[in-house]
Image (cartoon, rainbow, N blue to C red):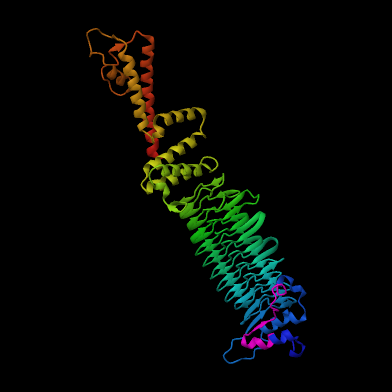
Amino acid sequence: MLSYEELTPPERALWDAFPEGRRVDLRTGVAEADDPADGARWGAGRTVRAAVVAALLLGANEEERSGAVAALRLVGARVSGRLDLSGAEISHTLSLEGCRLDEPVRLYGATTRTIVIADSWVPGVDAELARIGGDLDLRRSAVAGGALNLINARMAANLVVEDAEVSGPGEWAVLAGGLVLEGSVFGERLVTRGGLRVPGAQLLNGLFLPGARLENPGGVALAAGAVVASSVDCSQGFTAQGEVRLPRTRIGGLLTFEGAHLDGGGTGTALDCASMSVGEFDHRLAATPSGLVDLRSAQATWFRDSEQSWPEKVLLDGFTYGSIRSGGDPAVAGADGTRARDEVARRLDWVGRNPGYAPQPYEQLAGWYRQIGHDDHARRVLLAKQRHRRLTLSPPARVWGHLLDVTVGYGYRPWMAGVWLLALTLLGTVVFSTHTPSAVKEGEGSPFQPFVYTLDLLVPIGDLGQRGGWYWSNGGVQWLAYLLIAFGWVLTTAIVAGVTRALQKS
C-alpha cells in the first residue's frame, strides 16, 4: 500500500486532486517540450508511477468531498511502469491527456467507467473482455508497437479513435472481434499500420471511418463480418491498402465508399461483399479499385456507382438490388435519349465483367428495367445475355444462335423478321417481274403475279395459288425461287424459336 509520504510532488498533486476530480496539468506550455512522442525524456517533475494511478482508481483515496465527483484527470505526464487494471472494478473516470505511457495499458476483463487516453503516446491497449460503462476515447493518440485489443469487450457508449494512429506489432492493428458497442465507432482520419478486424461485432450505431487510412499491403485492411444497425461510412478519402472484407455483414442503413480509394495491395481482391445485406450501397469511388470486387449473393435496397467504380473483374452472380442510381442522379438509366442508351451500354459492360457466363446478373438488370417501365432496355439486356451464352455453346449451336440473332434478335427484336421479309419480297418481285415463267398447265390457274408469287414462296404456311402453277426454265431464276423457299422456312423457324425462347426467358 502506498503511503502519502513516499509520493513525489506530481503524485501528491494528483492524489490531492482525485477526490474532487480536478485536473493535474504538468505541461510546460511549449509545444515541442510537451510532445508525448518525446515523453521518455521527461524528468521526475513530470513523472507519475502507474502504481499510483492504479491505487487511486482502486480506492486508495476515497475521501468524499461535498458537491464533487472523484475522478482521475492527468495532463502532460509521463506514466512510468505498467498500468495493469485487469479484472478490476473501477467506479471512477480515468482521463489521461497529452501523456506518455511507458508500457501498455491492461484492462483485461475490467469493469470501468469512461476511459480517456487522448493526445497521448501509449505502446498498446488491451481491453479484451472489458466492460466499459461509457466511452473509450483515444482521439489523436498514438498506439505504437502494440495492438488495440477489444476482443469480446462491451461498451455502453462510443469508441473514439479520431485522428489516432495505431501501429500493431503484426498483421492486425485493431482487434475487435465480438465487440458489442451500444454507441458508434468514430474513426475519422484514423491511421492504422496493420488491419482493423471486427468479425462478429455488433456496432449498434455505426462505424464511421471517413478519411481513414488502413495500411496492410498484401493482407486485409478491414475485416468485418459484423452486424451494424446503422451505417458504415468509408468515404471522403478513405484509403485501404489491403483487402476490405465485409462478407455476411448486415448493415441496416448506408454503406458508403464515396470518394474512397481501395487498393487490394497485391491480394487480388479489393472489396469482398459476398452475402452482404445492406440497406443502401454507395460505391462511387475516387478511383478504379486495384483488385476485383466480389458482390456474389449480396443484397441491397439500392446501390449507386460511377464510371470509375468497377475494376476489370466484378463477381456479380446472385447480387440483387431494388434500384440503381448512377452518379449523383437517380435512375439515370431510365431517362430517354442518347444518355439513356449510353447508360444501358455501361450497365451491359458492368455485367460483362463477371467472369464466365452467369444468367442471373442479366436477369436482375432486365428485371429492374421492367420495374421502372423500360421494356426496350430490358429486351436489350436479355439479348446481350443470349449473345454471351452463345459463347459457351457447341459450334453447331453457335451457328444456330447467330442465325437467331441476325433474323429475329433471339425473339427480342421480332421486327427484324419483317425487315428480312420486306427485303426478300422486293428482291423476288423485281427479279421475277423481268422474266417470264412457264405455266405448269396451259390455260389453267390464275395469271402470274410476281409479288404474290414471291410471297407464296416465302410463306410456307398456306397456298396463294402461284407457287404450284408456274415453273422456270431459267436456271438462275429457279435457284432464286429455291432460296426464297429456304429463307421462308428459316425465317419462320427462327421467329417461332426466338419468340418461344423470349417468352420462356431462357
Q: Quadrant of the N terminus?
A: bottom right
Is residue 434 depicted above or below 235 in this figure?
Answer: above
Question: Is residue 18 part of the magenta span, yes or no?
Answer: yes
Residue shown at the point (73%, 75%) measured from the top left: 82
Disc count in the image? Answer: 0
Left/right of residue 51 with respect to residue 289 in the rendered view: right
Q: Position of residue 359 (x, y in %)?
A: 47, 42
Left/right of residue 47 with respect to residue 357 in the rendered view: right
Hey, which quadrant is residue 56 in on the image? bottom right
Q: Position of residue 196 (x, y in %)?
A: 63, 61
Q: Nearer the viewer, residue 339 or 201?
A: 339
Residue 103 shows in this picture: yes
Left/right of residue 465 with respect to residue 492 in the rendered view: left
Left/right of residue 493 with respect to residue 269 in the rendered view: left
Q: Nearer the viewer, residue 3 or 33?
A: 33
Is residue 380 depicted above or below 483 in this figure?
Answer: below
Q: Which residues are magenta?
A: 14-35
Residue 322 shows in this picture: no
Q: Position of residue 116 (x, y in %)?
A: 62, 75
Q: Nearer the viewer, residue 13 or 168?
A: 13
Residue shown at the point (24%, 7%) measured from the top left: 442
Q: Quadrant of the C terminus?
A: top left
Question: Is residue 414 part of the magenta span, yes or no?
Answer: no
Q: Position of residue 163 (x, y in %)?
A: 62, 66
Single out the residue that lies furthest toward the bottom. 66
